[in-house]
Each structure stands twice: as C-alpha cells, then as structure tokens.
Amino acid sequence: MIQLSGMPFQQGDLWSSGSIERMIIQRMIEDTVVYSYQFIGELSFELKLRKNIIVSARAMNQSKVRFERFLNSRCNPQYWQLTSTGGFLLRQGVKPSDAIQDIYVNSSQYAFECATAMIIIYYHALLNVIGESLFNQYFQNIYLYGWHADPDLGKNVTYTTHFLPGDVVYFENPDFHPQTPYWRGENAVVLGDSTYFGHGIGIKTAEQMIVTLNEARMPEANQSAYLTNIVARPSFIHLAKLSISQLGYSVHKNQHIIHHNSSSVPIDRYEF
C-alpha cells in the first residue's frame, strides 16, 4: 500500500490509465509493504525515475555496448580512465553528465559486466530526470565498477518476490561452469511487461533468462538457475529530497502546497 503524510494514498487522475506510472502505483498498492512518502513530490520523483530506469535499460539493449568480464572491460579514454581492476574512473575536467551520456552515444567503445551495467542505467536515468546541472553537482567522482556507487545514488537491497517496474532483480545460477564464472548469475531490470533486461543476455522473460543461464552450467549439472527474491533499488527518497531542495522547492505539509520562487501550486498537480 501507499501512504502519503501517514494517510492512504488515493491515486485519482494524476497519471493516465495505461501509463507505466499507473502500473507502478498499482503494484505498490497491491503490495503488503507500506510505501511511505511525506508528500506527493517524493512519490512523483520515484515514479519518474523508475520509468527512466526502464527507458535507459531499453536504450542500453539497443546500443552497441558489449558484455565482458572485468579483465576485458573497455571504455572511451576521452572520458574515463580504465583501472587495473576493470573499472571506469571519471577523468578530471570531464563533466559527469557528458561521460555518462557518452556510454550511450559512443556505445561501441564500451564493454563491461552486468552489475556495472545496472549502475550505468541508474546514473543515465537519474541524469534524464534531474538534468545536467544537478547531476554534475552531486556526482563529480563517478567510479563505475560492479555495484560500486556514489553514496547519494545509493543501493538499497530488499528481499521480496513482489517486483516493481524499475527494480533490479537477480537470477542465480548455482551450477555455473567454472570456466565461465561470470555466468554465476545475472542482474536484470524489471521492465513491467513480464520481461527483464540483463546486460549480456538482452530482454527476455524470466523463463528465457533461466534457459539462457542453464546453458552456461557445468557438465551434468542438476540444479537449475532461478529468479531470487533479492531486489536492488536506488535511494529514491534521498534523491528526491536532494533534487527538490536544490531546485528551491519547500513543502507546506498541512496545506499540501508546494512553494517555488514565491508561486504556489496545488500539490496534487505537482510532478517532476
């Protein structure tokens, strides 16, 4: 369920029927977990960021980036320094927004594994939500390596089988072949249409993901790959508060009014 200022949230007509936002809200309402927000701006921010995570995942699937283990990682040296461990360290003097966008623009120059792909998707989606100015202010020291992320981006891990569009889930492959340890599992974005995007596998249903991972098992393996209950999410509320405070918004909780530059907007009309 969803709570807004401690009260059950009634969706109303804020998001159109059939929209991804409406789908996410419905999934939240159906969950036994309480999704709590102080005001509508926090919920609106999370919905927009989740939507953009899906958009960024689909864009990566359409790009020319390659899947590689850390040893064979590649990046554009104009924006990133390739470390000895296979990570990408933002070069001094480079705008973080330009470097993240370059992964999608000049995608053929990049290769990385699936956890790094998820963090790149997070950064790219957030950039598209908050814009270059705020993004460059908060993420000046980006280091892309596995699940490593800036503290402001964060990664919250929960355990549930009630997935929301924009979640990142994990497919475990316990009998992976020892010669291909990078197929011990797959991180994947929940796209909301019963499919998932996993870097190196592409967009597939859960069953197709499992079939693909099973093909990378050791000889005579008897345990199938499976979808776990591990779910990763960025720090939606924290990011919303950072963004709103920097944009100059303040919230009057009792009157449900958001003030910005001396103008007032009814909170039920506010959205990012």
Image (cartoon, grey):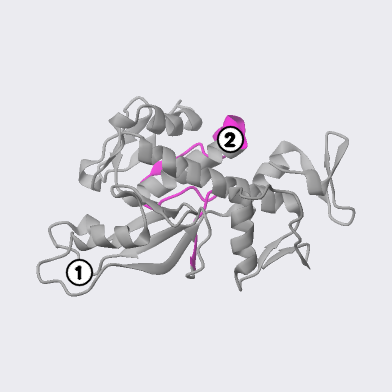
Q: Residues within 10 Å of mark 2 (few under 14, many from 20)?
A: few
Which residue lies under the disc numbered 1?
175
Disc 2 residue type? Gln
In the rendered image, residue 184, in percent from the top left (x then y), is placed at 25, 62
In the rendered image, residue 191, in percent from the top left (x then y), is placed at 47, 52
Along the line of sight, the residue nearer the viewer: 115 or 202? 202
Along the line of sight, the residue nearer the viewer: 259 or 12? 12
Q: Regarding mark 2 in the picture, which secondary structure is present there? A: helix
The picture quadrant where one finds residue 225 is: bottom left
Along the line of sight, the residue nearer the viewer: 107 or 98? 107
Pair 1/2: label in front: 1
Give the vertical position of 157 relative to 67 (above or below). below
In the image: residue 197, left or right of residue 268: left
Instruction: Give the residue drawn at x 80%, y 49%.
Output: 268
In the image: residue 26, left or right of residue 126: right
Quarter of the picture holding the N terminus: bottom right
- Rounded to the nearest whole Å, what is the CA distance between mark 1 and mark 2? 44 Å
User: Which mark sits nearer the N-terminus, 1 or 2?
Assistant: 2
In the image: residue 237, left or right of residue 61: right
In the image: residue 228, left or right of residue 260: left
What range is drawn magenta here? 130-158
* Mark number, residue 137: 2
